[in-house]
Image (tube, rainbow, N blue to C red):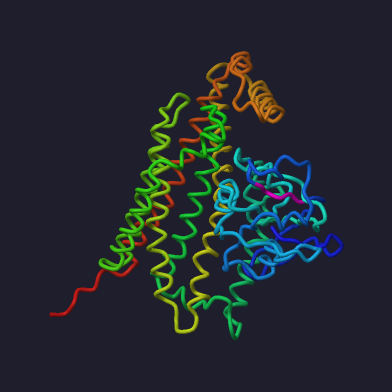
Amino acid sequence: MFHKSPGKAKIVRRLQEGGRLIAPKTWPTSRRTLPAGHPLAQAEAVTAEHLAELPLVQLPPAVTKSFRTDRNPTRTPAGMPIPPGPTGGTLNEILTLVGADWGAFPLGAQARRYHPRPDVAYRPLTGAPPVQWGLLTLVHGIAEAENGITRLQAWLPLVISAIAGVLFVLHERRATEPVLEPSLFHSSAFTVAALASLTLNFIAAGFSSALGQFGSVVLTLSPRTIGLLYLPGTLLVAGAVVLAGRLIGRYTPRPVLITGMLVLVAGGLLMAVTAGPTMALWILVLATWLTNLGSLVASASVAETILSHAPPGRSGAVASVQPAFGMTGYALGPAVYLLLFNLFFRRQWLNDADARGLSETQAAQAVDATRSAMAQSPATVGYDPNLLRQAGLDLGLDFTDGLRLTMLVTSLLPLALAVAAYFLMPRRVRPTP
């Protein structure tokens, strides 16, 4: 997301920080996230002057200065100081801080649709410029591939993304002072660590989106319950991360990264094996915990490996590799997970229809009717069993089978990184006698 005045919007704009092309779409309003219990959360709308009444959650230093200035103003239009709040590294962290009553944060109006939370209130923010949303062409192409890779809407964004990536690499290789020194990737350990950062965030974001879909649609869990799945074992995860840091200093980052990746694989395989319409809640908690544990343990090893390659005076630029690759994975994760899930889900309900003697048209109408019912009644999560019985399909089981296959396929990625780390990262150097 980024902000520009509507009159200066361009159809395609290049983000040099990431070498990506984006196709901007502008909505006329922006919203401010507020703690659900704050008095302003009951108002129909808030003004830009209200920004002075609550601390503003801050963006991390890794993002661009212009973006921080846009989302973290220090004064209101009338000149009132805006108190700074705590820093959130990701959108989920920012929303968690807002929900915990640590401050507020301005977002685009569409955030309410994609990130509904019971502890956060979204209210229109008047007196502020509109927010313009940018869509990564790579993510857009992956999302459109669900309807057919041969469609123009699918292959054109993917081609544009590939060209933009190549041009960015060529530019960095010719630049006198590149944003990221290409020679760093001559080190196999650095390359594995950078790809691991992408993978960790890819799995975390993708698992979160899949968990939200499965928990709400099949298990009919409330958003609050789904959020609480991340809470059990938090202290154990924190302790494991501290222990990982100690082990890195003693045994090098290699075994810690491999262990973290294998724990991620375990979390994915657990979901692939046990997911079902009537699965026990404790298994879902365990799978969520394993995913968090593996991601955070491995991230400690990633940070150590990347920073160890920083030449004097370039530690900041090299350290930014981790969040840059991480945000790329965070953007791709939900798109790829949902692409795989929808492909597998379609295959499952088509097989279901064929086994029950239903035509593809009849089955598609049943699926569309279910999706329409869910879209029209977002407050009542879940599907109508009576509707599905009339159609003759068991979409709950089909949905679950699609999720299982998705988790199985995506678990191959951290497994591949664990193998790469085993062979490509340096082993512990034994001291000479």
Q: Is residue 31 magenta?
A: yes
| Residue 373 position within the rendered picture, expressed as x and y whole percent measured from the top left | 69, 25
Q: Residue furthest right?
A: 7
Q: Residue furthest bottom?
A: 176
User: Is 90 positioned to the left or the right of 432 in the image?
Assistant: right
Front position in the image: 126 or 331: 126
Q: Main secondary structure of the magenta part?
A: strand
Quadrant for residue 70, please give it.
bottom right
Residue at image x 49%, y 49%?
204
Q: Is residue 328 visible?
A: no
Residue at image x 36%, y 54%?
260
**Magenta stretch?**
30-34
| Residue 55 position within the rendered picture, expressed as x and y whole percent measured from the top left | 64, 57
Q: Does 48 appear above or below 309?
A: above
Residue at image x 46%, y 62%?
195
| Residue 209 position within the rendered picture, expressed as x and y whole percent measured from the top left | 55, 42
Q: Is residue 402 visible?
A: yes
User: Is 240 positioned to the left or the right of 332 in the image?
Assistant: left
